[in-house]
């Protein structure tokens, strides 16, 4: 086999962040009676959350904001969209969101099957994720896939973030892998694929959202996880 070590991203690659976030926000919308506070359009609220979350994560990856600011500000901005300036409510929403989100179990189609396939072929399977340490481990446990992974490298654990080289170097060290026998699988061209390219590692772009970038050319591209059987 050309590869021995497989490094997956988690959110948006194996664990369906958008679906799980929507389920969690729907519960918060009901439990906190947000409609009575003026958030009567849940779909708009959810769409705004995704936009704010993506922008704040981009700022977090570049070191412009800290973890706590990311967590609270995304909720605060969602409330502000509906002319609600309530810091206490934003913090309550953040705390409940993180507690509930990590218990959600929606995975992308064929996640369990492909992980079992790779395990049966004796690959060493790992994760490199920019998510928070406690939250990511609870996601893995709740969704029943934690046992597949030898090493779980988070941005908190490595003190770095994809696409920076340092998080990949940390993952190489902890897993005992070499660049030449490793491959990275992730959904983000700018984060997962570019990060692996920067360190000289082959990559598979899990292109579930029809993302393209003329400057970033992955080694392989798939549109569903079952296609990994043709690569690995």
Image: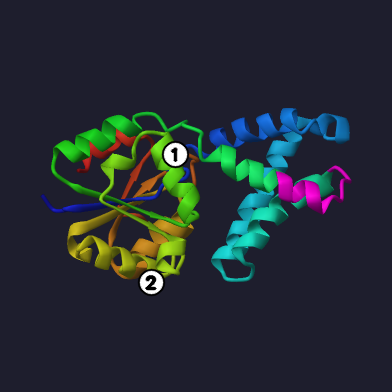
Distance from disc 2 to disc 1, alpha carbons, whole Å, reads 24 Å
Coloring basis for residues: rainbow
Residue 94 x %, y %: 67, 47
**Residue 89 covered by magenta stretch:** yes
Left or right: 112 as drawn, with respect to 141: left
User: For numbered disc 2, what is the local secondary structure?
Assistant: helix
* Mark 1, other Cα within 10 Å: few <14 / some 14–19 / many ≥20: many
Residue 231 in sight from this viewpoint: yes
Residue beneath disc 1? 15
Residue 6: % across, % down: 25, 51
Question: x%, y% of residue 88?
Answer: 80, 50
- Residue drawn 64% across and 58% down? 70
User: Considering depth in this image, is 206 or 115 the residue closer to the camera?
Assistant: 115
- Depth check, front residue: 206 or 101: 101
Could you say which quadrant of the image residue 40 lies in?
A: top right
Q: Please provide the residue range marked out in magenta.
A: 82-92
Q: Dot 1 lies on which element? A: loop
Residue on which the image places disc 2: 166
Q: Residue at x 59, y 58 (%)?
A: 57
Say few, some or many: other residues with alpha carbon within 10 Å of mark 2 (under 14 / 14 to 19 / 20 or more).
some
Residue at screen point 21% across, 40% down: 118
Which is nearer the N-term, disc 2 or disc 1? 1
Left or right, 175 with respect to 9, comes to left
Q: In the visual, does 30 lie left or right of 38?
A: left
* Residue at image point 16% right, 53% down: 4
Instruction: Estimate the x, y position of residue 100 in percent, counting from the top left.
Output: 58, 37
């Amino acid at each position: 086999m050309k590869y021995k070590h497989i490094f997956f991203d988690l959110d948006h690659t194996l664990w369906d962040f958008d679906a799980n976030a929507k389920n969690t926000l729907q519960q918060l919308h009901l439990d906190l009676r947000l409609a009575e506070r003026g958030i009567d359009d849940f779909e708009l609220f959810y769409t705004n959350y995704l936009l704010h979350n993506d922008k704040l994560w981009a700022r977090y990856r570049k070191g412009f904001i800290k973890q706590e600011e990311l967590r609270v500000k995304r909720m605060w901005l969602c409330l502000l969209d509906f002319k609600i300036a309530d810091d206490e409510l934003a913090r309550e929403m953040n705390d409940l969101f993180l507690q509930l989100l990590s218990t959600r179990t929606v995975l992308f189609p064929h996640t369990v099957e492909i992980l079992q396939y790779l395990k049966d072929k004796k690959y060493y399977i790992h994760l490199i994720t920019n998510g928070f340490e406690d939250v990511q481990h609870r996601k893995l446990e709740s969704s029943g896939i934690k046992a597949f992974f030898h090493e779980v490298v988070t941005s908190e654990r490595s003190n770095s973030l994809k696409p920076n080289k340092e998080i990949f170097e940390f993952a190489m060290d902890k897993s005992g892998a070499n660049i030449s026998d490793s491959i990275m699988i992730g959904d983000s061209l700018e984060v997962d694929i570019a990060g692996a390219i920067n360190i000289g590692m082959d990559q598979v772009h899990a292109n579930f959202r029809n993302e393209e970038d003329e400057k970033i050319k992955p080694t392989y591209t798939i549109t569903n996880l079952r296609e990994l059987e043709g690569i690995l």
